[in-house]
Amino acid sequence: MTTEVAIAPTIQSLPENEKFPPSRSLWGDALLRIKRDRIALICIGILSLYSIIALTCQFGWIATPWDKVVGAAYQPPSFSSIELIFGTDLFGRSVFFKVLHGTRIAMSVGLMSSLLSIPVGVTLGALAGYFGGWVDDLIVWFYTTVSSIPNIMLLISVTFVLGKGLSAMYVALGVTAWVGLARVMRGEFIKHKSREYVLAAESIGAGHLSRIFKHILPNVSHFIIINLSIQFVSAIKSEVILSFLGLGVQGQPSWGVMIDDAKLELSRGVWWQLAGATFAMFFVVLAFNLLGDSLRDALDPKLKH
Amino acid sequence: MKLSPGAFQFNNSWNSFFWNFFIFGCFTLALAACSRNQSKEPANTLHLVVEAKLKGLDPILAEDRYSGTQSAQAYETLLQFHYLKRPYVVSPLLVEKLPDVSADGKVYTFTLKKGVLFQDDPCFKSTGGKGRELVAEDVVYSWKRLADPKLTSSGWWILDGRVVGLNAWRDRASKNGEKHYTEEVDGLRALDRYTLQVKLTQRSAQFLYLITMPFAAVVPHEAVDFYGKEFLNHAVGTGPFRLAEYHPTSKVVWVKNPTFRKEVYPEEGAPGDHEAGLLADAGRTIPFADQVDVQVFVEQQPMWLSFLAGQLDISGIPKDNFSSSIGPGQELAPDLLAKGIRLIKQPVADVTHLSFNLEDPLLGKNKLLRQAMSLAFDQNTFNEIFYNGRAMAAQGPIPPGTDGYDVNFKNPYRQFNINKARELLAKAGYPGGKGLPPLEYATLAGSSGRQQSEFTTKMFAAIGVKLNTNTYSWPQFLETIKNKKAQIWEFAWGGDYPDGENFLQLFYSKNASPGQNDSNYRNPEFDRLYELALTLPEGKQRTETYQKMVRILVEDCPWIFGSHRLSYILAQKWLKNYKPNDFSHSNYKYYRVDPRLKK
């Protein structure tokens, strides 16, 4: 009682414009931090560029058709035309076009596999953390089992079952990549479920589903964003590895396939396919990693110190 | 042996697996490697390579050339292909002379050499480890092993249906088990200690060729009993070398067999052999090498680097190292010449092809569609890209140098002509490919296989035929084709012996999948000619029959015929007496290292 009395006059005595200091939401705060972070802005720029390339390739606005013969086999890079800027491959196709279309494949794999794995990870993590007990035991057992299988082995076996091709790869990556997110979600839900705002919700009659999705989830959703950036990178890398192993996309240009070609070509001095694919991959992976770090700093300030 | 050119096909048994490597890498020979750090090895040690891990040394299971070649260093067959003579002829190995054949061509009498000893081995308990003499009963025993259903030999086909009473023995053996070996087979008898009589069910021009294959090698029953399941990892034969070390995934070491009988280097060869120095050692006692180190190299680049470092005596040339090793005039690059390395070119008795599954309702019934696709495939460009021009476009299944090959014959459906292809496709009912569903195309996983399938897809896309590519590992691939699940696939076949029959049997209806006729081709007229040809002796009539069969095939188009390849092999200057041989397996005994040239 006494504290209330002591505070109330203080607020009232402040000038009108300072009475309610601008309070920022979690997201507003994060946005501000990101805006101040130059590296994060550059990364967002790079990723936007990749996304635009991926979309324009998807709609056939640029670099189409990618399999057109533009010169002799293994023509080295030259500036005589845009098609020859990265040279040509075994069949005389433009390596530059292949790199651009590889971007389309990589970005779509990252996006689609994230769209598949996030709902799975979030739901399982939330249920385990929220309910505890045997539900928790079951889900923890399940994801521990999945994560005990070496990731690349699991991916290979899933692609063997589903067959090869792009959509199989989306699913393969989607069903193997949710473990990390589920683990984080479970921890957060355990932490949040006994907090006052959840108890308050319960006391006004909110059901389990309402508490999970309406009350707790928005408060831990920034982990999904952080996880997304990590997930994207690992999906892109997995796509390249699978394609390199001959289990990935068929009949379409992919960075992994280009690196696989380079394995044979390097001994004859043809380095441009390798260079094109690895540079393209380098920038997108680096941008996602740096952006992931920045997002974590921005959205989860406690971790910063 | 089945091969894979991206996936090519080989024959039955023999060679199946390694052909795969062969084609991918455009290597043509599996040879051997080295290890410099062996301090105590004799100066004349051979350093050779095998390009695949070994399955074992039991001859009846040696279905790929890698294992077959190794087992042939210790185990010998009655006959062998002459090392130097071309065209290939069969010459005696464990027998005194070529067999006497009865007038009807069905009874063969072999006279074994006397004094041929099995290598000393603990399995010969009664003599305290001393190897005993090889007798005719050993041949009977070994061939019964080949027929024994429990041992599931992949080489049974060489005797299947050919020897009187052997198939019946096999059927009974599956019921009665081990004791069955004592039961006599009418067509397979030891008349005395050194005389073997074989009765055939019908005249066969191929019989002598077939028994040169390692499957038919002679093994002592003592070793089989003594080692049991471990027999696979031992070698107790009569051959020039005995096994010193055996690591199937990395290395095999052979040493000279001290009890080897006196054999000499051939005194006759083919024209040009004398000039090439291949007859310099004529009449000298073999083997020359005291030791043979055989290194397993699965990857081509390390093998190539070992060869360049002088640690290997022979090597093939990987496709991507071709332009740096071979000049525009197909001559050896100066840096290799300066090292004294020799380039040996030799055509290989093989054929690569794209097979159509004729049991598929779409492809099987539409000959015009198959012909159109055949016309649309540009083989010369393919050979340029994938074989560095080391191949010639095939006009039919039979390669040059093999009976039945017609040098003047041009296959009307294999002359690349995109307009005519479009015309035929329209006649087939799919103008511009309209209405034609994508074809399921099977190929092998792997970088070269993928590149080849990209090329194939592009070729057919030009006339509007779409392919759905499915990649498989080698065993999966064979399984898919055996089960008739694919519509079109790449394959290759490497000859087992120099006779067109070995290639034409790939189209005989009774050999349909899971047999060797992978495209499931059926044509009564072709079958009739095939059965006729089997009974014909070598000569004009048989050659003409073969050629007639080829023309039937060309018109029916069960395959898109690919190429006959040319192998480029490099040998170090210190390696003497090296001559590639498609069909013989125990060649190490002829190779000689000159240590003076090795410094």
Image: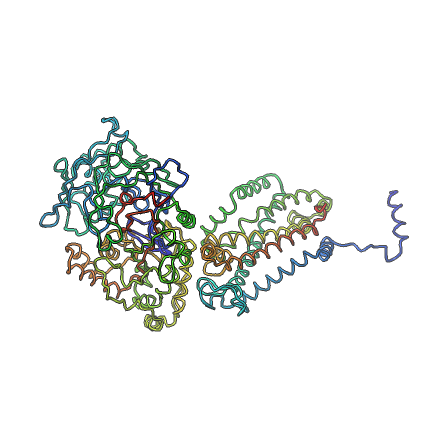
- The image quadrant where one finds the C terminus of chain A is top right
Quick check: can you spot residue B126?
yes
Would you identify the image quadrant in which residue A62 lies? bottom right
Question: Is A213 displayed left or right of B76 in the figure?
Answer: right
Quick check: can you spot residue B440?
no
Most foreground residue, B99 or B476:
B99
Decide: is B147 above or below B507.
Answer: above
Residue B345 screen position, x and y as percent: 31, 56
Residue B434 screen position, x and y as percent: 39, 70
Its colouring scheme is rainbow
Decide: is B187 above or below B390.
Answer: above
Count of marks, rendered view = 0
Most foreground residue, B512 or B17:
B17
Most foreground residue, A209 or A283:
A283
Question: Is A158 displayed left or right of B146 in the figure?
Answer: right
Question: Is A293 displayed left or right of B490 in the figure?
Answer: right
Would you identify the image quadrant in which residue B560 lies? bottom left
- The image quadrant where one finds the N terminus of chain A is top right
Residue A205 screen position, x and y as percent: 70, 47
Residue B102 screen position, x and y as percent: 10, 47
| Farthest residue, direction left | B103
Decide: is A86 above or below B494.
Answer: below
Question: Is A188 displayed left or right of B461 in the figure?
Answer: right
